[in-house]
Amino acid sequence: MTNFKPTLAYAKEQDKHDPINRFREKFHIPKDKKGNDIVYLCGNSLGLQPKNTQKYIQEELDDWAKLGVEGHTEAQHPWMPYHELLTNTMAKIVGAKPSEVVMMNTLTTNLHLLMVSFYQPTKTKYKIVIESDAFPSDKYAVESQLDFHGFDKKEGVILWKPRKGEDLCRIEDLENILADQSDEIALILIGTTNYYTGQSFPIKEITELGHKHKCVVGFDLAHGAGNIQPDLHKNGPDFAVWCSYKYLNSGPGSLGGLFVHERHAKNPKLKRFTGWWGHNKKTRFNMRQEFDVLPGAEGWQLSNPPILSMAAIRASLDIFEEAGFDNILAKQKKLTGYLEFLLHDLKNDRISIITPSNPEERGCQLSLAVQDADRSLHDKLTKAGVISDWREPDVIRVAPAPLYNSFEDVFLMVERLKKCLE
């Protein structure tokens, strides 16, 4: 967009005409010591609390107090099928069919459960491709899977790296890896939106490339769910996992989710670790039957879900449903575009944006590389009332979340950054 203006009046005018600006009032915005709103641009690390979260959780506490165990069937929102209240909206957000999605466990737990099913190495085809700067938990998970299966984890991990002197991965380099080593590669596991650079990878292209070379393809949507539209069903990866406490605003350490493509819904050859909540709902409480797996993503469930955490997720997903995810994504592109414009307008050599400039290759996060960084600039920015995120060795991550951040937030952040740089 070329008609941005670097003025507070312009930012306020954009907020005035923003069709989803009213949703900011549905969130608790942290305050400084003087009671002023902090400029909170850290939804990529922990989303803000919806104001209805307390109400949703309190309803379940009240039903527990009044009903005890009967709450499983008699609560206002019965606990037995409670996870189903989250499914339809979550499926829209990740571009899946409801049968392909379930909210359960936490991200790395779900990743391990799905690798039990989808990482089936042989003596010769056992290696796993990840991006070189994948989130550490992903790296630890794939290394431990290799070790569990008896492979050397240093030999078994193939890193998709940026070229020397570059920050971003190129798809043609992944193509070369597959062309050279596909006979040895069992799994491609990529973080859809890289936590460090903010680069969003082409899901469809990677999936087709992997399947062409007879590799299973999975994605970590930790920084993608609620931030980009991954169109998981249409793009066709075998599986995906995500957390819900970043852009999905469900609270610290809340449950994650997973996707399993419908072509695997009834595959009897898939191995899995099982638990009673993945058993046929009609006979689950008969207790003494052999395991009868549910079709689709629900069949990977292990235990009955934590209702209080799910209530917090429902509180946020109801806001997503009301706002409309297409509207959220449209604002995201414009809001982050405005942030990018203002940062370029600084014309300061100490700051460079390493996130792709193409809106289709990123979400809302911009990663700012700081020349000669020692974290001091980030600390000054924090003291100036801007909550962002520091990642070693030299990056400040800034993420204007479209549901609760405003154009004025973005303008104030850059103005305060300018003063910190001076």
Image: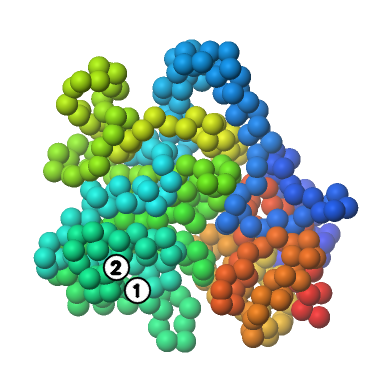
Residue 161 x/y as whole percent = 38, 77
In the rendered structure, are the residues bearing label 2 and label 1 in contact, judged by CB atoms less than 8 Å apart? Answer: yes
Residue at 20% over, 28% down:
292
Q: Which one is nearer the viewer's eye here, 265 or 118? A: 118
User: How far apart in space, not on screen, are marks 2 and 1 (Cα)?
Assistant: 7 Å
For residue 192, what is the image quadrant? bottom left
* Mark linked to residue 129: 2
Residue at 20% over, 20% down:
288
Residue at 77% over, 79% down:
421
Could you tell me if residue 286 is visible in this image? Answer: yes
Q: Which one is nearer the viewer's eye here, 59 or 211? A: 59
Which quadrant is the C terminus positioned in?
bottom right
Q: Amino acid at mark 1?
A: Trp
Farthest residue, direction left: 123
Regarding mark 1 in the picture, which secondary structure is present there? strand
Q: Amino acid at mark 2?
A: Val
Which quadrant is the N terminus positioned in?
bottom right
Residue 143 x/y as whole percent = 31, 65
Work out whether 175 lies above or below 96: below
**Labels 2 and 1: the sequence-earlier one:** 2
Residue at 67% over, 58% down:
41
Which residue has dot 1 on it?
A: 160
| Left or right position of 240 against 211 | right
